[in-house]
Amino acid sequence: MCSICKDTLQDFSINHTEALCPLRNSRYCSYCAQYGHLTKSCPAKPKQIFREPAYLEQLIPYSDLKEYNISSKTPIRYKEVEEPQQLLEIKDDDKVIAAWLSARSIKVPKGHTKRHTLEEYAKLQNKRVVYIH
């Protein structure tokens, strides 16, 4: 068993190398047309100008383009979607917050509240704190 599939395919009993891993070989990237990783985690994502279709007119059938004499090329605007900020959901109780901080060995400095320390930690982790009642 290789390091790629040991967590996912725990009952897979055939010994193999990472180059011959069935899990790795089942992942296909449509950007670079290679096996081994998924499209969303491709290290060589194409720039916007290389995406197809690039123009609205490419969505219209060729016969209609000829019939209506359409020769323009209107670029399609792509909007890159940013991933939403991760949430850190915690019960709105001082004991719960104190237990959460102590479980992660985070000390509360003098003059700071536990909530303030938690929110500072969340900012460092690029997360947003949501208090649940």
Image (cartoon, grey):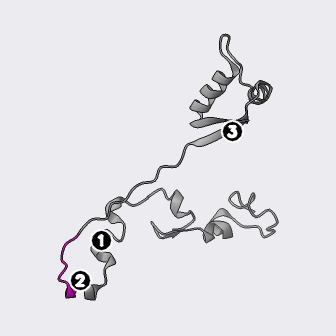
Residue carrying label 2: 65
Q: Which SS class for mark 3?
A: strand
Assess disc 1: are there few (<14), some (14-19) or many (≥20) residues with their C-alpha within 10 Å of its C-alpha. few
Mark 3 vs mark 2, CA separation in Å:
53 Å
41 is within the stretch colored magenta: no
The quadrant holding residue 104 is top right
Asked if disc 1 and disc 2 are in contact, CB closer than 8 Å, the reply is no
Q: Earlier in the sequence, mark 1 or mark 2?
A: 1
Q: Who's the residue at 70% across and 21% down the image?
A: 114
Q: Which SS class for mark 1?
A: helix
Q: Earlier in the sequence, mark 1 or mark 3?
A: 1
Asked if disc 1 and disc 3 are in contact, CB closer than 8 Å, the reply is no
The N terminus - image quarter: bottom right
Image coordinates for residue 14, horizontal then vertical, percent: 78, 70
Q: Who's the residue at 57% across and 31% down the image?
A: 123
Q: Earlier in the sequence, mark 3 or mark 2?
A: 2
- Above or below, comparing residue 4 to residue 86 in the picture: below
Image coordinates for residue 108, horizontal then vertical, percent: 70, 18
Judge by depth and name the residue closer to the eye, 54 or 114: 114
Q: Amino acid at mark 1?
A: Leu
Image coordinates for residue 73, horizontal then vertical, percent: 22, 70
Q: Amino acid at mark 3?
A: Glu
Residue carrying label 1: 56
Q: Is residue 27 left or right of residue 105?
A: left
In the image, the segment drawn in magenta is: 65-73
Q: Dominant secondary structure of the magenta stretch?
A: loop
